Every structure is written in structure tokens, then in C-alpha cells.
Amino acid sequence: MGLPTPTTVEKLQTTLHAKAKSKPDCRFYSLYDKVYRADVLAHAYRCCRSNDGSPGVDGTTFEQIEQYGADRWLGELAQCLREKDYRPLAVRRVYIPKPDGKQRPLGIPAVRDRVVQTAALIVLGPVFEADLQPEQYAYRQGRSAQQAVQHVQRLLIAGHVEVVDADLSGYFDSIPHAELMKSVSRRVSDRALLGLIRLWLVAPAEELDATGKPVRTTRNKDEGRGTPQGAPLSSLLANLYMRRFIKGWKELGHEKRLGAFIVNYADDFVICCRGSANASEAMCVMREMMSKLKLTVNGTKTRLCQGRDGTFDFLGYTIGKAYSPRTGGSYVGVRPSAKKLKGLTRKLHGQTDTKRWWLEPGQMVSELNRLLRGWANYFCLGAVTKACRRVMRYTRDRLRQWLKRSSRCRGRDTRGSPTSTCTSVWGCCSSNADGLSARRERRREPCPRAGCGRSARPVRWAGGGNGQGRQEGSPRNARSGSSIDRGSCTAPPLDPTDRPRRQRTPLMVTRSCPGPPDGQRRRGPITVTKRCKRRRHIRGADEARRQPGAGDCIRPMATPRLSCPRRQPAAAPAPLFLRPRAWNRRGCVVR
């Protein structure tokens, strides 16, 4: 929970956790009255409000509750709990697509049920936190999926290179109620609270059929298993039941005998072993224990893999053999998996669909930034440079195409919206936001060498120390007749009726860079002469010849515009990520 916890609630949680930690056999018999406390319910409501989820089967939203009065609504809910008249409503069943093409069922309780479950989680969380194993990283305060990935990487480096990549089929829908309630009652003896948990487990599910009519099913009650994935309390119950497997693995001696260590996150876990024989035996033992726990192991996805000479995917990361780009040596590294990269590009493609041309550029860029920030915050381990460059390149290409469509321009020419437009003008996430350092980004900046990329001549400077000299062996621009100031160059205004022409002869373009500001090492202006040999479309080349010194006709340094001059943005939004101005060793401004 990201919200700050009130002092009274924090004191209650600290007391419960200290009591459970100091006395492993202690059972709490009076917890129901803590659930409907005013401060606990108020904090639970704020947590649910911050998530801003969808309404349940009753259609009640947080806006309606606030119009009715949040304090009044919470008071009535507390009175209902105090008199033990509370009954949970049905759970709205929805399906979300999975990467393999299947669908994952989710249960969305009503707002009132979510608030009560969050209040119960606030009370029960500190009690069971003292019993959870250190190998469990899901839904726990101070633990994350990145820590689980780092734990697996440390085990591989330590020599546990034989990995059992396990997968459970429908873990949340397969948890048996009887065994789960035994795990809960081992710590809680409050009958009112235990009865409330049973009501949540057997709540019916409501979904829409093919004709759009709501249909209710009582599968959990009839079969006696399953907890709705998506409810606030289901995460704690899932961790509590998985604890039985991890604790049994240790107490039965499999960890020491086979040298097999488990790393778990919700329903995903891996077993790192020493030796292929131990890994095969560990897989057999794991299948037997899961069958006793009444859980199903997915045979198609569960496999044995080698962590040092091969790779495997865990929590969206590809873990295994990697190569250093500097030395070429191999090491055990992590990187974003190809499946997650493909899923992200699919989302970016949908966000920048040409059917959404009617959106404002600022709104489109804000949606893209929100998606990119979330992806970059999660995939921040290991070698992410290559993946980030690929993602940003695809994002900018899609954004350019969308800008052309929104400007009513035809064709696939996207030079009117270069990277600087997507980053500086429209505020699209730059490389500084996706994990690349400024040092890596400066490597792409043009160096003071002449040529167009294929062949280049080193630049030799002639003249005095005042910087008024020119490049030795390179004449001034014979066509323009003057040098072009890179720091203050501005492109001439373009005529909308003028069409780009193909340049037939090479051009000599001379640029002059100002020196650094006062207080830094000064070498004076630097003049660079570049010969462009490749033929290309040059917009405004004739105007630049007729107006010497007006601007660089090949690579204008002014604020770029959209490729279509017929429709220009009225006002560009404030940039979210701007690259700071820096000075290189020769005194040139590096953007």
C-alpha cells in the first residue's frame, strides 16, 4: 500500500506483529472488533480509493459514495459489521488475455466488500507476516519481484545451475478451502472473523453469457476450492497456502539433501539445484508434494533447464548465460525477456493506432509516457540498454507515423518529426528516462569528423588561438559563401507550395560552433567543414543558396516541425524529459 499509514493503525500492526513473532504458537482470539474500527476502515477506504478499480455487481462507484458522503457510508458499514449483519455480494467475473492466447479469470468484488477485505488484510497481515518464509517475495512489504530475480541470480552464481522451472495450473482457482482454513485457524481462533473469510471464499461469481445476460455460478461453494484472484485478501491467502509447500520442503530435508533452494513469487517458483540428478529427483518430489496439497502441476510448462549454459524466463526476465559487450566473456546475467518486449510493442502499436488520430499530441504522449515509465520501472535489472533502445526506437517510429496521420500527411516519410521533436517538443520519454545514462547517449552525437558516415577525414584546425581559423585543407562553402553558426542557426521560412528537390551535386557546408561559457576552458569558435556526397531530398536548398548564412540547408538545427506544413501544432506541451545542455572537450554544445 503506497499511502502513509495512520499512527494508530501502525501502532496496532506493530503490536500484532511483535506478538506473533515472539510467540510462534500464539492464537489470536479477538480480532473481529479491530476490523470495523473507524481508523482501520477509513484507511482501508483510502487504499481502495487510490487503486480506483471498477465497480462490482451492484454498480456502485467511489464517486457515488463521495456524493453520498464517505464518512456516513463508512459509519453505516461499521454498524453493519458490528451487528454482524454483513453479507458479501457476488463477485463480478472478467477475463483478461494471457500471452499464450488463453484467458485468465479475475474476480472483482463490490466496493463495500473490497473495503472490508482490505480492513481484514490490515489486521491479519502483520500476524501472518511473521510466519511467511524468506523465499516468498509476493505481496509483502519491502519485497518485490526484482529481489526474487536477484535471489535466483545469486544462486546460479553460487553453483546451483540446474533449475526446475515449475508452473502451476490455475493456482488461485485450485486452493482447497478446508486445508486453507486450517492454515488460517492455526493463528486465528476468532469465530466471527473465520466465518467472514468463509463467506468470501464461497461467494458466487457473476459473468455475462453470449447474449449479454448476467449468469451466477457457485463453483467455489460446490467444489470447495478456489479464491477469487483480484480480491484484496486473495494475495494473503495464496501466500499462506504456498507456505505449506515451502516449509514442508525444508522440514522433510529436501533442501539439504538435494541442495535445492526454492524462490517463490505468488504461483511462480523455481528450484535451483546442484547436479542434474538432484534436479530430476527434486522435480519428482515436487510433483508428489503438490499432489498431496491438491494442486496441479502444468506438465507442458514445467521443465528442467541449465542456468549457466542456457537461459530460462522467470517473472518477465530472461536469466542465464550472457556475454559482456566489452570483454566478450560469458557471465550469468538477467535481461528483459523477448515475450515481454513483444507484449510491450503490441501495446504501443495499439496506443498509436492511426484510428486515434483525433487525440491531441500532448494527450497521446502522456499515455505513452505512462506506459513506458511503468515498463522501465519494472525492467531495471541487468542488461537493459539494448531492450530500451529497441523500445524507444519503435515508440518514436510509431509516434512519427501517428503525427503524420494526425497532420493529414500521406506517405511514410517521417523526417519532419525527428527524435528531437518527439523528445524535446512533445515530451516523449527520452533515453534518460528508460535507463540509459547520459554518457551512453552522448556516444550517438556527431563527432567533429568530416563526411557523411561511410568515409571520414580527421579534422585539423588552423589559425590563431582566438578560434577564427578554419579547417586546414577544406575550402569555404563555395555556394553559400559564408559559414553557418551552429549555435544560433535558424532555418529560413519555408513556402508551403515549394516541393523538396533532389540535390544533384555535393554541397560544402561549413559550421561554426561557439566556445563554452565564461568560467570554463575556452578555445574559441570551431569551424567544421563537412562534405555531403549522398543524394537526398533537401527541403529549402534553393532558398539557402539565395540567402547566404541563413541556415543549414542539410541539417537545420532549429526547432523541428511536423513533416506537413499545412497543419502545425498550436502550442506544444511542456516537455517531460529534457536532455541537459553539456559542453564537450572542444567547446561545442552537446544537445
Image: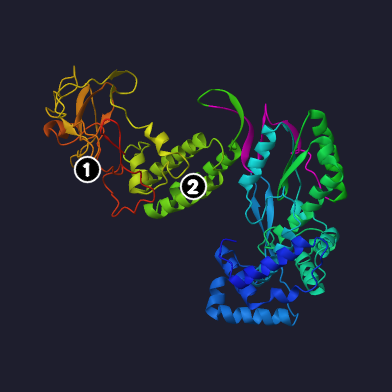
Q: Position of residue 273 (x, y in %)?
A: 77, 34
- Image quarter of residue 420: top left
* Vertical arrangement, residue 553 with respect to residue 373, above or below: above
Q: Is residue 299 magenta?
A: yes
Q: How many marks?
A: 2
Q: Is residue 90 magenta?
A: no
Q: Position of residue 367 (x, y in %)?
A: 46, 53
Q: Which residues are magenta?
A: 295-324
Are there few (<14), some (14-19), or many (20+) residues within 10 Å of tag 2? Answer: many
Residue at coordinates 14% horizontally, 34% vertically from top-left? 549
* Vertical arrangement, residue 350 with respect to residue 224, above or below: above
Please identify the quadrant where the C terminus is shown. Answer: top left
C-alpha separation, residue under disc 1 versus residue under disc 2: 35 Å
- Left or right: residue 522 compared with residue 122: left
In this figure, which residue is indicated by the disc labeled 1? 496
Residue at coordinates 37% horizontally, 44% vertically from top-left? 422
- Left or right: residue 557 compared with residue 42: left
Q: Secondary structure at mark 1?
A: loop
* Vertical arrangement, residue 77 with respect to residue 9, above or below: below
Which is more N-terminal, label 2 or label 1?
Answer: 2
Q: Which mark is residue 372?
A: 2
- Left or right: residue 72 compared with residue 193: left
